[in-house]
Image: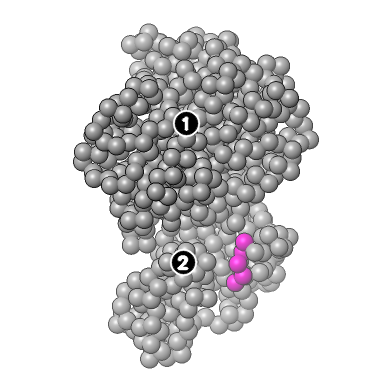
Amino acid sequence: MILVNNDTKLVVQGITGSEGSFHTAQMLEYGTQVVAGVTPGKGGQTTETGVPIFNTVQEAKDKVQANTSVIFVPPPFAADAIMEAVDAELDLVICITEGIPTSDMVKVHEYMAGKKTRMVGPNCPGVISPGAGKIGIMPGFIHQEGKVGVISRSGTLTYEAVHQLSSRGIGQSTCIGIGGDPIIGSNFIDLLDLFNQDEGTEAVVMIGEIGGTAEEEAAEWAQKNFTKPIVAFIAGTTAPPGRRMGHAGAIISGGKGTASDKIAALKAAGIAVSESPAGIGELMEEILKK
Amino acid sequence: MNIHEYQAKEIFRKYNVPVPNGGVAYSVEEALNVAKSLDSSIFVVKAQIHAGGRGKAGGVKIAKNLDEVTLHANEILGKTLVTHQTGPAGKTVGRLLVEEGIDIARELYMGIVLDRQTGQFVFMVSVEGGMEIEKVASETPEKIIKEWIEPGMGLQAFQARKLAYALGLQGVQVREAVKFMFALWNAFNASDASLVEINPLVVTGNGHVMALDAKMNFDDNALYRQAEILEYRDLSEEEPSEVEASSYNLNYIKLDGNVGCMVNGAGLAMGTMDIIKLYGGEPANFLDVGGVANPDTVSNGFRIIMSDSNVKAVLINIFGGIVRCDRVAMGIILALEKVKVNVPIVVRLAGTNAEEGARLLANSDIDFIVATSLAEAAEKVTAAIKE
């Protein structure tokens, strides 16, 4: 597994908001070690679920050794929340918040350069290492412990893929939703690199979508560097150009970012591509049998 | 969000980016009045629609006198323009921009967009002005010169000079172009734009740098703090059903097919459209009902899907995570009491409490076609269309 394991100690930024408190309860129920919450002004209190609240991320790190953060802070304040976690030098910050202005993320991107913290998201379902911990909003019960990694730009489409794997008895090492925004903390290559080094991962499912060129770059990188099999799916073959398909990053603009370009690049790199979103599990099953 | 050329030029003026004198007109009479107010003997009448390629489609005309302004305004107003960006249905012109004619010595290109790879905004210029920039980018990428903007620093003078020299500008024009670029960057940055394009950027006969055209798009996520920009939204340029959907916080995009879809999550919604196509159908829309598929969102979703008379069947695909499928099923049943749907409905529920959900649907008075897998759902909905 990568990113989330038995040593993960989580701080929830925005723990007293409706999303934050609901998902904190869900994460605790799954067995995630939630050691702290942060809501400025509510330091010293404790949540109904028994999690101590601090005013700052630094306090949560100093007092209860939080090493990972998840962010449920509303969009206007989310960029600031990310930078606070980076400043506290946590290992990992996972930003669930959807709708952060791009220019805020441009600043965050610059701020993070050369810093220790890795970011996943924003606008993502989070990260789960089945059995070890669930950080985010995905349904825990569809996952199974196992050896297939999943990296996806989408939320529910990831659940769909995981469901197809689990129902075939194929468990997962770690599943990561990298987020649907144009600027994200960790891209396909960053995570493929981690899966490459992870002994607990035998193969990877990669789910991309229209917009940008991240899938093409990942294909090129994987051909040179990745030693394990990959099954890919790209959503948006039928998406019209120039229209934002829900995600801020899912838009075909200037003739770039089409599904067919991405599928061609993946195939050229020797990656197995499922034409149908319903065929991801089946294709992985075939490949694992080989 | 997109805005019109004349609105982008208003923003340009506010930030001291030079543009031709001119004004918007909603009628022939107004067009003539704008022309009369300009100190010029030659005019340009430009259709204002949210799409490029207007010139080729006959939406931009030069008038050599006021009579010709009337003539062209008459012709263009109310006309439906079909360009490579409008789709086959085209767009009807309701507004004109009337400007003074400009003596053009050179046509250049300038734009600012986000570079996803570097996570920075990038300034781009090219001497291939007036051309389709996508074509230049793919055929002769070396003709596009770029400078990346460091967010903490903003555009630097040396970068603007490099771009100006790359455009082949000389002498006083370089200084003018540098000033132009600073003004443009300020306009872009202050308004949370996601794209600005000037094609063509011109050098006038007497050597000045000017934005002859102007295109601006804005980051939807930042509109909450851009009240002035939000006022530029022109609802008549948007699909009415999409406007209605956005008022319910639903993410809907109308397409040309006949299979309506209702899905939770953008990626799965795209995947659902794709699999419909794969099974020989054509999706009628993209609709992401988001995380909360309650009776209200579902009935609003149905209402919007069914407002498209092309829809011959509906596929509902919900992957219940936090949202429970039995609740979604109740929502669907309640919604169908409010909204009449007289086409086959295929429902696929997966995830949390999917079986209870399927049982509720099966026991209701409504004739649902229930599917358990995504493939089965696609097969059943495309079969329903053919019957």
Quadrant containing the N terminus of chain B is bottom left
Q: Residue at x 47, y 40 (%)?
A: B379
Disc 2 residue crowd, few under 14, some 14–19, many 20+, Cα 10 Å: few
For disc 2, the chain is B
Q: Amino acid at mark 2?
A: Pro
Q: Position of residue B344 (x, y in %)?
A: 34, 43
Q: In the rendered view, would you say A67 is above or below A232?
A: above
Question: Which residue is more in the foreground, B102 or B140?
Answer: B140
In this view of the protein, can residue B32 be seen by the observer?
yes
Q: Amino acid at mark 1?
A: Ser
Q: Is residue A283 left or right of residue A157?
A: right
Disc 1 residue crowd, few under 14, some 14–19, many 20+, Cα 10 Å: some
Q: Residue furthest left?
A: B338
Q: Residue at x 60, y 41 (%)?
A: A275
Q: Residue B373 shows which numbered tag?
A: 1
Q: Earlier in the sequence, mark 2 or mark 1?
A: 2
Q: Residue B99 shows which numbered tag?
A: none
For disc 1, the chain is B
Residue that label 2 marks: B88
* Secondary structure, magenta segment, majority class: loop
C-alpha distance separating marks 2 and 1: 35 Å
Q: Is residue B167 left or right of residue A185?
A: right
Q: Give the residues drawn in magenta, as a range.
A: B130-134
Question: Which residue is more in the foreground, B197 or B179?
Answer: B197
Quadrant of the rendered image containing residue A263? top right
Q: Nearer the viewer, mark 2 or mark 1?
A: 1
Q: Position of residue B188 (x, y in %)?
A: 50, 55
